[in-house]
């Protein structure tokens, strides 16, 4: 094995395991709304759809259980978490903590590049809203929040955000029918993006808090 001076030989790259691939595929299906909140997951049907055996499937689903996306009910089976008021409140508690922290740090660094990135996502939202593509609006919405957290340049904060990203996407999908006019959603995000200017940290924080509170209210009202 060839070596570089001063560097110990590295182990060969190991391909992603089947359970990891299964977990990724099911996680994406959850985020895309293919598996509705509260749905029961049937192992035999999932194994057939994914073309895998039950052993790796169970291991993959166990990973999602450990992440909190799935819950096991004794004598009933495995279910996707519900968007209950309690779950929604807890999801937004985590989201708000991560995104407010990220935004505050962006302001301590340089808000200008992040503002530009966020406005790109807002423009994507605007175009999608204009064509009536609510799914594309949601996709751009997710990219907006990812860009804001990435702008803090904190690997640990970004990892924390990734742990709640699937639940975030679930909530954003659920928000789609609560907007009579999707342009309202676009303008909320535009206001946040434009607040990333020198000296604007407090205003950004106020807008994020209001944005999260509005989403929380819409989602909980939808459950009644």
Image (cartoon, helix red, strand yellow):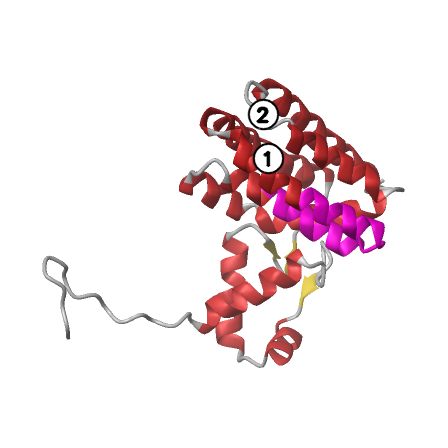
Instruction: Label 2: state its secondary structure.
Output: loop
In the picture, measured across the screen, residue 188 lies left or right of residue 50, that is right
Mark identifier at residue 197: 2
Query: Can you give x and y, in whole percent of width and height, for residue 41 in the image?
Result: 66, 65
Residue 170 pos. (x, y %): 68, 50
In the rendered view of the protein, which quadrant contains the C terminus? Answer: top right
Residue at x-position 48% and y-position 73%:
56
Disc 1 element: helix
Residue found farthest to the right: 180
Tell me the quarter of the picture where residue 192 sits: top right
Residue at (66, 45) in percent of width and height:
121
In the picture, measured across the screen, residue 159 lies left or right of residue 84, that is left
State left or right for residue 111 relative to residue 120.
Answer: left
Instruction: Note whether 133 is above or below 84 in the view shown.
Output: below
Who comes first in sequence, dot 2 or dot 1? 1
The reply to whether dot 2 and dot 1 touch (C-beta < 8 Å) is yes
Q: Residues within 10 Å of mark 1 (few under 14, many from 20)?
A: many
Camera sees residue 83: no
Task: Assign the N terminus to one quadrant of the image.
Answer: bottom left
- From which residue to which does the magenta span run? 121-145
Badge 2: residue crowd in 10 Å (few <14, some 14–19, many ≥20) = some
As drawn, the label of residue 115 is 1
Residue 140: x and y in percent read 68, 49
- Give x and y (percent) for residue 117: 59, 42
Residue 35 seen in this snapshot: yes
Residue 101 badge: none
Q: Main secondary structure of the magenta part?
A: helix
């Amino acid at each position: 094995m060839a070596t570089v001076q001063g560097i110990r030989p590295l182990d060969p790259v190991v391909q992603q395991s089947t359970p990891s691939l299964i977990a990724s595929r099911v996680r994406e299906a959850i985020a895309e709304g293919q598996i509705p909140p509260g749905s029961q997951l049937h192992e035999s049907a999932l194994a057939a759809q994914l073309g895998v055996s039950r052993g790796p499937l169970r291991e993959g689903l166990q990973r999602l259980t450990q992440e909190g996306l799935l819950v096991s009910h004794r004598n009933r089976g495995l279910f996707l978490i519900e968007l209950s008021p309690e779950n929604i409140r807890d999801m937004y508690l985590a989201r708000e903590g991560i995104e407010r922290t990220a935004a505050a740090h962006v302001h301590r660094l340089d808000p200008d590049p992040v503002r530009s990135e966020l406005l790109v996502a807002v423009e994507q939202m605007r175009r999608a809203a204009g064509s009536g593509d609510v799914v594309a609006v949601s996709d751009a919405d997710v990219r907006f929040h990812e860009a804001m957290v990435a702008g803090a340049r904190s690997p640990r904060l970004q990892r924390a955000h990734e742990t709640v990203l699937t639940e975030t996407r679930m909530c954003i999908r659920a928000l789609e029918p609560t907007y009579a006019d999707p342009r309202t959603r676009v303008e909320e995000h535009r206001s946040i993006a434009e607040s990333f200017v020198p000296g604007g940290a407090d205003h950004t924080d106020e807008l994020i808090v209001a944005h999260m509170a509005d989403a929380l209210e819409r989602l909980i009202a939808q459950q009644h």
